[in-house]
Amino acid sequence: MQFDFPCEVIREGEAVLAVPKLSAFKREPWEYAPCKAPVFYNPVMRLNRDIAVIAVQVFQEMIGRGIVIAEPLAGSGVRGIRFALEVDGVEHVYMNDINPLAHKMADYNVEMNGLRGRVTVVNEDANLFLSRHSAPNKRFDFIDLDPFGSPVCFLDSAIRALKDGGLLALTATDMAPLCGIHPRVALRKYGGLPLRTEYCHEIALRLLIGALAMTAAKYETGIKILFSHKTNHYVRAYAQIIRGAGNADKSIRQMGYILHCFSCFYRETVQGIAPLLNGKCSECGSPMKVAGPLWLGRLSDAAFCERMENKALLNRRLDARAKRIILLVKAEADAPATYFVIDKISDKLGLTVPSRERVMKRLVQKGFRVWPTHFHPCGIKTDAPASVVVESVRQLAR
Ligand SMILES: C[S@@+](CC[C@H](N)C(=O)[O-])C[C@H]1O[C@@H](n2cnc3c(N)ncnc32)[C@H](O)[C@@H]1O
Ligand SMILES: [Zn+2]
């Protein structure tokens, strides 16, 4: 190989790739090797890419024509190469990275996978690359934004570079701000306040989508969320871009706030950018804390998820974890915002923890709807009020 740092050849999906030999760059056990290597490749994100391949395949079939894809932050090129090899109907893939070594490695990998002519590799700033594709005849059908940390500084140029009806996938790994550890950072980047509740990961995803909705609205563009998930250290959304001022207004109407009572688990959602917020919990009178403005609309589209599920179940090589995430996300597509975490309630009550299944069964017996959530292994979404969920946990612990 023509690289002057340790490399190895690996297989991921249908791609065979040269990537940095991560063990050579990890000096201390706590170091995160992908960030130490001269070119970025993270094997842990394979699950993210496996799900992306399925989502893009379903999207291509949905629009029923050849698609052009862009990956503005490509690293080793693994993602773009997998799209070219594993998704039917891909006409061309553009991969870009600002790092000259990543450009060289991605180019090498394109050659190794016999994709010369179908995949173009570019070496410039992602915003510049996307802006050069903002003219109507140069736009993409699908853009995958997979940055270090937050994707917000690439949102404007990505929206401008997408065709009407195009798909934007975006990953955010800056979970400390998004989950409320650094609320001022989240406010600066996402234009909304996070909250350190037991469902902070859902709030993180809703803040990311909210920032996208408000950015798209500037370009008289609305969004429809087809799929989204929280996995490992990141949140990820797949949003269809729909041009038109009316669609932008419709998206803005799905913005709002989540109010949370840390005393009794009561929570409520309030639609609107500037609504009157009730400062007191209507159950126990404690002061309510606020998250938002953020996206209160659906986090996934049930029909799109069902098509993903069908694809996933037919794919014998797909990791069981990817299948489970798709299954759970589909099942909770129509569930209300926020979820309850059984351990958290038991902890506060000082009681033993009943299983999620038993609590769900009890809530159903009481006439409420329930959904397990992919966000948390002990999480339940339900239309039951907090007081009923807390009482059910108490009864089952007795
Ligand atoms: C998380 S890695 C991408 C990983 C890749 N998408 C994958 O699936 O393996 C982020 C990449 O963005 C690149 N990058 C950072 N800032 C950039 C910028 N302003 N323009 C273009 N590339 C940039 C980095 O060099 C790095 O390779
Ligand atoms: Zn309360």
Image (cartoon, grey):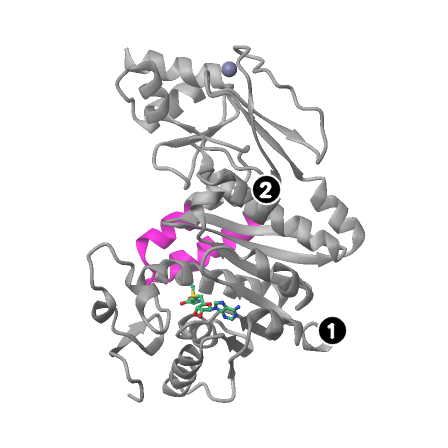
Please tell me which residue is depicted at 28% across the width and 15% down the height of the picture.
351
Using the image as rendered, state which of residue 372 and residue 98 is in the foreground.
98
Residue 310 among those drawn in magenta: yes
- Mark 2 lies within 8 Å of ligand 1 (Cβ measured): no
Comparing labels 1 and 2, the label whose residue is closer to the camera = 1
Question: At which x and y percent is residue 63?
Answer: 63, 65
Residue 299 visible in the snapshot: no
Does 376 sit left or right of 262 as displayed?
A: left
Secondary structure beneath label 2 = loop
Image quadrant where one finds the N terminus? bottom left
The residue at the point 59 percent across, 55 percent down is: 239
Q: Which residue is mark 1?
A: 136
Q: Residue at x 23, y 54 (%)?
A: 30
Q: Residue furthest right?
A: 245
Instruction: Residue 180 in the image: state x and y as whole percent.
Output: 47, 37
* 291 and 5: which is toward the camera: 5
| Residue closer to the observer: 172 or 125 | 125
Residue 256 falls inside the magenta stretch: no
Name the dominant secondary structure of the magenta segment: helix
Q: Give the residues drawn in magenta, as a range.
A: 299-327
Residue at image coords 57%, 55%: 152
Q: Position of residue 91 (x, y in %)?
A: 56, 79
The x and y percentages for residue 193 are: 56, 37
How far separated are the C-alphas under marks 1 and 2? 29 Å
Residue 193 visible? The answer is yes
